[in-house]
Image (cartoon, helix red, strand yellow):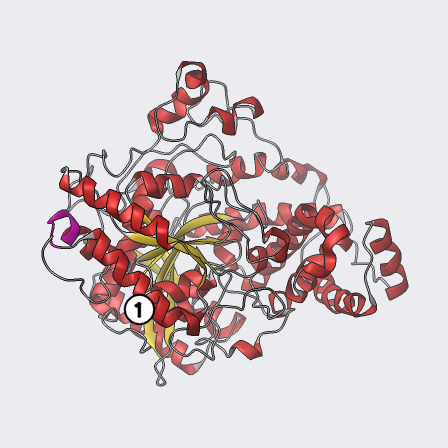
Amino acid sequence: MAALPASPVPTISPAEMQILISRSGLVLNPGQMADLVLAWRQVAGLIAAIPQGRPLVDDLAFGFRLVPPGSPAAAPGPAAKPAARPAAKPAAKPAAKAAAKPRTRARPTAATKPRPRTSSNAAPAPQTRATPKATPTPQAPARHRASRGR
Amino acid sequence: MKGGVPPFPSIAEAGRLIAARKLSPVELTRALLARIAAIDPRLNAFLLVTERQALAGARAAERAVAAGRKGPLLGIPLAYKDIYETAGVRTTAHSRILADNVPTRDAETVRRLHAAGAVMLGKLATHEFAIGGPAFDLPWPPARNPWDTRRFTGGSSSGSGAAVAAGLALGALGSDTGGSIRLPAAYCGIAGLKPTPGLVSRRGVIPLAPSLDTAGPMAWTAQDCAILLDVLAGHDPADPASVAVPAVSYAAGLDAPLKGLRVGLLRRFYEHDVPGSPEVLQMMARAAATLRGLGCRVEEAVLPPVQDYNAVGRIIISTEAYALHEAMLKTRLSEYSRVFRVRVLAGALIRAADYIAAQRQRTDLIAETARTFARFDVLIASPTAGSAPLLTEQRPDDGFARPLLTTVANVAAIPSLVVCGGFTATGLPLGLEIMGPAWGDATVLRVGHQFEQAAGLRGRRPEL
C-alpha cells in the first residue's frame, strides 16, 4: 500500500496556543506563555523531523502484544499488583498463584544466590540466549510497548 | 573487626574487607557520614541524610557478618536518587509538589538492596521529576560537580553522580529516560548503567515518561555496577514492563577475555551529528586503541542520525510527562520550576497523531539498531560533546535545542554503560559509552570493566 501524504506540522499562533492551553484547563501568565512559545518552536521542529507518511499497514508495527497464557513472561492482571507482592518473605498461599511463576524466575537475593553461576573464565552471554543475533527482533521492547497503557 | 576504613573503597573492595571482617560496616558508615557532613555543603548532592537509619542498617549488617552471613552488598553504604520511594523516608522528586511526600513502601529496587544488606545513607538530588535540567527556583539547590563545583553534574541523576564521584557513597541508584544516568556518569567521571528495559523493576520509582524510563546503578567502577545489578535485576510482576529473563551473575563473568569481540565505533555520532571537542575525539581514538589492545576487532559502525532518535525521544518524553502531570499543572503550576514548565508544558500542544508517529518511528529505530548488532557485539561512542559545562550555561530549553547522544539507547531499548574514558587537560572527566544489544548488559559491563582496568583511570579522584 502506498504511503499516505505526509502532513506538515501546522503552525500555531500565540492566540491559537492560548485557546489550546485553555482547553487543557491551564492558566498561564504572560511569562509562562512566552516560555511555552519558545518551547513549542523547538518541539514543532522535532515533530517535523519524524516521518508521518507511512503505509496504513504499518499500524501493525505499533500494536498491542499479549503474552500467551502460561508463558513465564506473562505479567499478572491488575488485580495482582502491589498487594500481591510480599515485602520480604515468600508469598503466602492466597497470593502464591499470581506470584508463583515469576518468583521461580526471580533472582535470588545476594545472600542466598549461588554464584558464580558461570565459571569465572567463561563469558556470560545472556544476549545470545535472550535475543539471538540472527533474529534481532527485540522481544522486550514489544512487551514494553504493550504494557504502556498509562 | 580489624583495620581502619580505606580511603575511597570500591563496593568490591569494601565487600571483600567486610566479608573478611577487616572492615566494620559501622565504621565505614560513620566515615561516610562524616565525609558527607564535611563536603556535601559544597556539592548539594544530598537532599536528606538518613543518619539514624544508616547507623541502624550498618549495625544490623555488622551483626549479620558476625553471624556468618556473606554477601557482596552486606554493609555497603548506598544512596538513592530522590525519585525512589523509601518507606517512612521523605521522597520529593526534588519538587515542591512532593515536598511532604512520605511513602509507606520501598521501591522494589530499594527493597532488593536492603534485603541484600545494603545501608541507606540518604536521598540524592535530582532535577525536578527527573526532567534533566538544573533549576535554581526550587527549595533545594542543584547538585554541583565535584571535579569543579562551578560546573554541571549532568542530569537528572545529578546527586547520584556527585555523591559517588566525591566518595560520599559507594554506589547510588539513578534513573535514565534520555541519558539521566549516563550524562552524570560522564561529567562526574564514574560508571553508570542504563539497563535493558524490563531488566530492573521500576515499581516505586516516580515516573517521567514510562515508555523510556529505566532504573539502574551508578558507582565508581563498572564492576561495582555489575555487583549492584546482580541484586537489582529480576522479574517484578508489579512492574508491567518487567520481563522474566534467565538469571545470570553480571559480576561473575567480567574478566572473560574480550579477544575477537566485535566493537563498532559510532564515529559519525561524535564527529558529525553532535560534534565533539578535540579532546573528545582524542579520547575516543585512545579508547578504540585500548580495546584493540584487549583483542577486540574495532570497526566503524553506522546507525541512523542521533537527531532521529532525539526527535522521537523528546516527543515521547514531553507528551508522557505532560500527561502524567496535567492534573497537578492545572492547580499548582507556579510551584514547578521554570525548567520543568518549559520542558513539559509543550506536551499539551502535541497531537495524539504526532505522539503515535513518534512511537511508530521508535519501532523502526529499534529494529534498525538491532540489525546493526548482527555485525557488532557492542557499539562505542562519546556520550557527550565535551566535559562538564558551567552550571550557569544551562538553558531551560536545552533538552530540545541540543540533541543528546545518550538518547539513542533509550529510544533503541538497549543497555548502555558509561565509564570514565579519560580526562581533559584541565582535569575534567570525559565519558566513554558502551552499548549492547537488548539483554547484552553482561557484555557491556565486561567491556567497561576491562577497559577501566586497561586504561588505569580509576586511581584519580576529585580534590575536595
- Residue at 32%, 34% in the rendered image: A107
Q: Is residue B132 magenta?
A: no
Q: Secondary structure at mark 1?
A: helix
Q: Please provide percent x and percent y for residue B316.
A: 63, 51
Residue that protrudes farthest toward the top in the picture: A93
Classify B257 as above or below A120.
below
Q: Please provide percent x and percent y for residue A113.
A: 23, 35
Residue range in magenta is B17-22
Q: Please tell me in which quadrant of the rendered image residue B451 appears.
A: bottom left
Q: Is residue B21 magenta?
A: yes
Of the residues shown, which amino acid type is indicated by label 1? Ala
Left or right of B59: which side holds A87?
A: right
Residue B345 visible in rendering: yes
Q: Please tell me in which quadrant of the rendered image residue B13 appears.
A: bottom left
Question: Which quarter of the image is occupied by the C terminus of chain B?
Answer: bottom left
Q: Please provide percent x and percent y for residue B10.
A: 24, 59
- Residue at 83%, 57% in the rendered image: A27
- Residue at 57%, 30% in the rendered image: A65
> In this figure, which residue is indicated by the disc labeled 1?
B288
Classify B61 as above or below A69.
below
Left or right of B92: which side holds B355?
A: right
Residue A48 visible in rendering: no
Comparing B378 with B450, the one in front is: B450
Q: Please provide percent x and percent y for residue B136.
A: 60, 71
Comparing B260 with A107, the one in front is: A107
Comparing B300 with B105, the one in front is: B105
